[in-house]
Amino acid sequence: MAISTVIALAISFSASAQIYVKVRPVAPVVVRTAAPSAAHIWIGEEWEPRGGTYAYVGGHWAAPPHPGWIWVPGHWKRHDRRGEVWVRGHWRKR
């Protein structure tokens, strides 16, 4: 029981940890293909924390989860002297 509690705490801590960078990673060149449908939205620059750094996961078409929802792009946010952190993009009602 105690081991599973420690593992659960470690997972929840690592999922919520912020990764700060002094130099932003460079996004790869991604060729935008034709949209699968008129309803699809292009998700461009997007970064995901992995192993203490950021990995590029943008450059794809996605359909909104609900009719009328829009994509709010992610962005870099400065935090004092610690550096910058990626704020993920997300869907929201129009």
Image (cartoon, grey):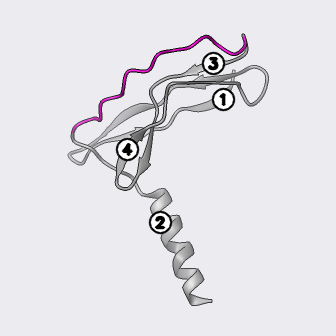
Marks 4/1: CA distance? 24 Å
Residue 43 pos. (x, y %): 55, 24
Local packing at callout 4 (Cα closer than 10 Å; few below 14, some 14-19, many 20+) is some
Q: Is residue 31 left or right of residue 90?
A: left
- Residue tagged by mark 1? 92
Q: Secondary structure at mark 2?
A: helix
Marks 3/4: CA distance? 23 Å
**Residue type pointed to by label 4:** Tyr
What is the residue that sits farthest to the right in this orientation?
67
* Region rendered in magenta: 23-37
Marks 1/2: CA distance? 26 Å
Give the mark, 3 or 2, whose residue is nearer the N terminus. Answer: 2
**Residue type pointed to by label 1:** Arg
Circle on res. 66: none
Rendering quarter of residue 72: top right
Marks 3/2: CA distance? 32 Å
Circle on res. 54: 4
Give the mark, 4 or 1, whose residue is nearer the N terminus. Answer: 4
Pair 4/2: label in front = 4
Circle on res. 41: 3
